[in-house]
Amino acid sequence: MNDAHYHLLFNHFPIVGVFIGTLVLAVGLIIKKREVKLTALGIFVFSAIASSFAFYTGEGAEEVVENYAGISETLIHTHEEYAKSFFTLTLILGAISLIGFFTELKKIKYSNYVIIITLLLAIANGILATYVGTSGGEIRHPEIRSDAKMIPLEGDGN
């Protein structure tokens, strides 16, 4: 396996984790179940760890694919910029989630404020996740690019 394999293996975990964690945390706040909120915070910490693997295999993945036909340096650069922001925000989300985890466990008076801040940060990070995921996919999947042209299949009669 090379860095491109590793990058593809790890890059979905933080993105999916942020979305699942956000849903779980929202449900935990609505139903007021501590265990559900703690689970969501754990998912965010896992996402932060996974984002480290995804981020640090990105450069090697670029080296593998940058000379392939049809690979755009502009698309790679756009993805890198989104990835840096997503990585940073995911690490911050993971750190605040750890704080929230312990304040929730210790039943500290202001733990609910930390949980709400975590949810708001997770929503913002989820929005950023869509950009990093889409920009990464566009590198090797021209069919999802906004400038994609329909190419008729052989035998399609067009």
Image (cartoon, grey):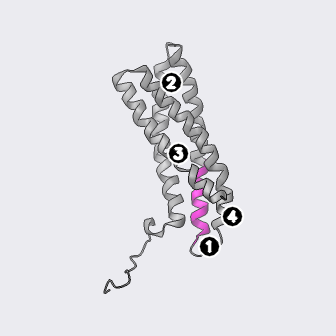
Local secondary structure at mark 3: helix
Marks 2 and 1 close (CB-CB < 8 Å): no
- Pointer 4 residue: 63
Q: Does residue 93 appear in this view?
A: no
Q: In 3D space, how far apart are the residues under numbered discs 2 and 1 (Cα atoms)?
A: 46 Å
- Please, what secondary structure does the residue beneath circle 4 have? helix
**Rendered position, 62 above or below 88:** below
The image shows residue 127, relative to residue 4, as above or below, that is above
Local crowd size for mark 1, using a 10 Å CA cut-off: few (<14), some (14–19), many (≥20): few
Q: Which mark is residue 13?
A: 3
The CA distance from mark 3 to mark 1 is 26 Å
Label 3 amino acid?
Answer: Phe
Task: Tell me, yes or no, whether the two marked residues, 1 and 4, touch with CB atoms within 8 Å.
Answer: no
Q: Nearer the viewer, residue 121 or 15?
A: 15
- Graded by Cα atoms within 10 Å as few (under 14), some (14 to 19) or many (20 or more), the crowding at tag 4 reads few
Q: Give the range drawn in magenta.
A: 71-84
Q: What residue type is labelled 4?
A: Glu
Element at label 1: loop
Can you tell which of label 2 and label 4 is closer to the viewer? 4
Relative horizontal placement of residue 20, taking residue 54 as reference (left or right)? left
Query: How far from the left and from the top, in percent, is residue 71?
Result: 58, 71
**Type of the residue with mark 2:** Val
- Gap in angstroms between the C-alphas marked 4 and 3: 22 Å
Q: Which of marks 2 and 4 is nearer the N terminus?
A: 4
